[in-house]
Amino acid sequence: MRNFSIFKLLHISSLWAYRFVTWAVLVCGFIFALLVLGVRFWVLPNISNYRETIARELSAATQQRITIGNLEGAGAGSICS
């Protein structure tokens, strides 16, 4: 039985494939980190602006009257304990 290799089939070296996968993982990790930082420092500090919208959507989803008295997120400069 002959050895089957996807690398031979595609005419590329395994070193090139490993380098590509490594760079792809690094780029995806960097993009994920940017998304997390964006949520942490852009969305969460302004979450109180969406209090009524969140309460309205929760009320519609649960078919119960929901009110939110205070809503805050830990943003830049905030320390959570």
Image (cartoon, rainbow, N blue to C red):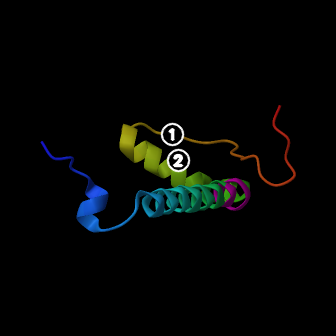
Q: How crowded is mark 1: few (under 14 residues within 10 Å), some or many (20 or more)?
A: some
Q: Distance between the residues labelled 2 and 1?
A: 6 Å
Where is residue 38 shown, x and y percent of the image?
66, 61
Q: Give the range drawn in magenta.
A: 37-44
Which residue is at the far top? 81
Q: Earlier in the sequence, mark 2 or mark 1?
A: 2
The picture places residue 6, in percent across and down from the top left corner, at: 27, 56
Contact? badges 2 and 1 (CB < 8 Å) = yes
Is 55 displayed left or right of 3 in the figure? right
Q: Which residue lies furthest to the bottom in this view?
A: 11
Q: Where does the N terminus fall, quadrant-wise?
A: top left
Q: Outermost residue toward the left?
A: 1
Location of the C terminus by quadrant is top right
- Give the vertical position of 27 relative to 60 (above or below): below
Residue toward you, 36 or 21:
21
Front in this rendered view, residue 19 or 68:
19
Residue at 70%, 59% (x, y): give it: 46
Quadrant in the picture for residue 70 = top right
- Which residue type carries mark 1? Ile
Q: Mark 1 points at which residue?
A: 66
Q: Where is residue 76 in the image (x, y as percent from the top left)?
A: 82, 55
Instruction: Locate residue 58, reporting x and y percent.
Output: 45, 44
Instruction: Kindly identify which residue carries mark 2.
Output: 55
Dot 2 amino acid type: Ala
